[in-house]
Image (cartoon, rainbow, N blue to C red):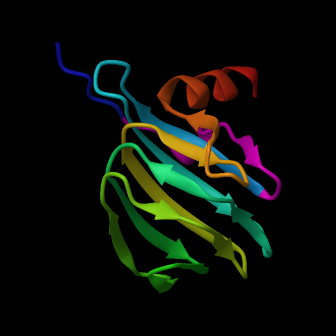
Amino acid sequence: MLDERLTTPAEMKWATLAEGIDFTLLYSSAETGRWTVLFRAQPGSFFGPHRHLGAGEYFVVKGRMTYRVGEAVAGTYGYEPLDVIHDHTAFPEYTELLFTNYGPVAFLDDKGDVASILDHKLLEDLMDAA
């Protein structure tokens, strides 16, 4: 069975993921763990330390994101391999970021231990509650 879909802007629901960062879930797969979201990040918002437990890809639709690799401005594509750790990912201005991850992301505490897991299921639950 094909899982073809078309999601229009009017159909998109938004939920909060972190302070100043909202998302809409465009696709998720319980079978593979893959998920695609569009983030809307307010100026000054950020993601704390995290480790990618699946490779990820992003495209900056508008705005600017800074992290250990450098600065990604509108029109930038990026690839993040399995097991990469980002200490701080910041959005110094309003940013829209299309992001696909091929598995979970583990957010880390001050000691480097896993504090929480962001995966397809959590994203689905947050969308259901929105």
Magenta-colored stretch includes residue 10: yes
Between 120 and 52, the one lying in front of the other is: 52
**Left or right for 17, reference 87:** right
The image shows residue 69, relative to residue 83, as above or below, that is below
Counting from the top left corner in percent of width and height, residue 114 is at 61, 39
In which quadrant is the N terminus drawn? top left
The verdict on residue 38 being magenta is no
Return the x and y of residue 75 as percentages of the image width and height: 41, 81
Residue drawn 36% across the image and 25% down it: 29
Between residues 40 and 105, which one lies in front from this camera angle? 105
Q: Please tell me whether residue 68 is drawn above or below residue 15 in the rendered image.
A: below
84 or 124, which is in the foreground?
84
Q: Is residue 65 above or below residue 30?
A: below
For the point 45% across and 55% down, the residue is 99
**Who's the residue at 75% across and 28% down the image?**
130
> Is residue 85 rendered to the left or right of residue 110?
left
In the image, farthest residue toward the left: 1
Q: Position of residue 15 (x, y in %)?
A: 72, 39
In the image, which residues are magenta? 6-20
